[in-house]
Every structure is written in C-alpha cells, then in structure tokens.
Amino acid sequence: MQKLFLFLAIAGIMSSFNTRSSDIKEAVRVMSYNIRYATDSDGKNAWKFRKEQVANEILFYDVDLLGMQEALYEQLTYLKDQMPAYDWYGEGRDDGKKAGEFSPIFYRKDKFKLLDKGTFWLSKTPDKPSKSWDAALPRIVTWVKLKAIAGGKEFYYFNTHFDHIGKTARQESARLILTKIDSLTKNGDTPVILTGDFNVPPDSKPYQVLTGKGSMLQDAMKISQLPHFGALKSFSGFEVSPELAGDRIDYVFVNKKVKVLKHGILTDARNGAYASDHLPVLAEVLLQ
C-alpha cells in the first residue's frame, strides 16, 4: 500500500509539472534545492551515489532558474558538466571564493542574459566573509540580475541558506535581505524572486518578517493559481517514509510583479531514497 501511495504521488507531480502552461510561452520554472553537501559520512547516501540522481531530477523538470544550498565546489563542477545548458554564479561562504558551502544560482543560458551579480553575508558586516548575532556559521545571499531573452523582462533573483542554530540570526537575516532587496531594486516595479533553505517553518518570526506587513514578498505556495501539489514538508531525510522527518523550511518567495502559476514540493525517489535530505521546491511563474 505504501509503494502504491508513493507511485501515485510521484505520478501526480510529474503530470502537474511535466507540461508547461501551454498558453504562456514566457513562463519560468524556478527551483529551490538543498542538495546536501558532499561528505563520506553519509554512507550509502553520500554524494558519489546520488549525484546522477540530483542532476537528472533537475533536467527532468526542465528547470530554468535554480537556487541550491549546501553545494560544495566539487559538486558544482560536476553539475555544470552534466547540465551544459546552464551557467551559474556563486561564492564560497568561508572566503568569498571556493571555500565552504555555496548558495549558487544556476540559469539557462539560452533563456537569460546575466546583467549583474553579487554576494553578501548575513551579518553586521555583509560585504566580507563573516557571521554575527548567534549564528553558528557564516551564511550568504547570492543574487543575480537577469534579462529574459524572450520578452526582455529584467528581474532579480536571490538565493540563500539561513543559519540552523541562531534564532536571532535568522530574524536579523530576514530583515537584512529585505533591506538589500529594496536597495538593489529601487522600487516595486522590478520582479523579484527569493529562494532558499530558511531553516524555519511558516509560523516562525523570520517567515513573518519576510512575508508580513511592510514586506514586498509573498509565499509562492499560498498564491499559486493551481493549488499547491505534493508534499507539505520539505525537510525529508534521505529515507522515504509515510511521514516526512521535518517541516516546511524551503521556500520560493516572490514580489507582486511575479505571478505564480504552479507550486509543488517534489517527492521523486529511487530505491527507497530521495536524492537529498531536502525535497526540491518547484514553482512555475510569470514575470510581469
């Protein structure tokens, strides 16, 4: 019975996202995916055993924009080789170069032109590698300004990974991101997309900062024209089970200049295991 349920869930998600909204040629598929960093301590779930599954999942869903979390440089070089249609930008959080985890952004080269890019740290000194408040680790935001080749629409895409320990750090990180978005975009007429592993559920203070009064952002899941499909949690652990291990902590946020057509949390698995300990979040959006 469990296997039948899993098959039906996967089949439903595939039918929902395999076909793009046929009446809107400019629709863009955005994915947020914590791919779990490469470490041999994961045993049978180590990167070397699942890297092909991660790449194939991204390619299967025909993703246009992809924000990853926990990616190490070796993982990024592998994925770039497997996905030649994409280019990417990001910096290692430890030194602003190649050291430590990245929160990179991948984008389709045939669909977008890179206009600008940058990285800032979620700290009191955002222009250099650093951590502040009660954060356990340095955390970063990667951003790009892109231009859609079809239609010429310009927009900003931000991607991040909040600290897993610091409660104050997560709240202050949410406030800092909003300040930076406002500074870069100048006004509310530019489409904005923010993805990431925020390490907080929807009833948390950081989530309320990001989506509450005074913020320009909305949770894509809540404003999707097609009601949300798939799992209701995004932290899963590697093992497939009827009850996911964690909570919904991975999100796609957008401002009012982005219409959300579809939203789902994907539960594709192979041999009883997911490709990562987080499930990818996928949204199909229209830049306005």
Image (spheres, helix red, strand yellow):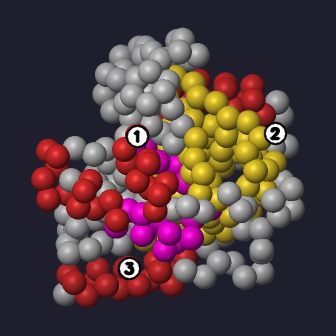
Mark toward the viewer: 1 or 2? 1
Mark-to-mark CA distance, 1 and 2: 34 Å
Which quarter of the figure has residue 6? bottom left
Left-right relation of 246 to 9: left
Q: In the rendered view, tell whether residue 130 sits above or below residue 244.
A: above
Sequence-first disc among 1 and 2: 1
Q: Position of residue 4 (x, y in %)?
A: 25, 88
What amino acid is at disc 2? Gly
Mark 1 sits on what residue?
A: 73
Dot 2 crowding, Cα within 10 Å, few <14, some 14–19, many 20+: few
Q: Nearer the viewer, residue 85 or 28?
A: 85
Give SS at disc 1. Answer: helix
What amino acid is at disc 3? Ile
Q: In the rendered view, tell whether residue 146 sits above or below residue 23.
A: above
Mark 2 sits on what residue?
A: 188
Which quadrant of the figure contains the N terminus?
A: bottom left
* Residue stretch rendered in magenta on the structure: 53-71
Left-right relation of 85 to 139: right
Residue displayed at 31% across by 28% down = 165
Give SS at disc 3. Answer: helix
Which quarter of the figure has residue 283? bottom right
Mark-to-mark CA distance, 2 and 3: 37 Å
Mark 3 sits on what residue?
A: 10
Cβ atoms at labels 1 and 2 below 8 Å apart:
no
Which quadrant of the figure contains the C terminus?
A: bottom right
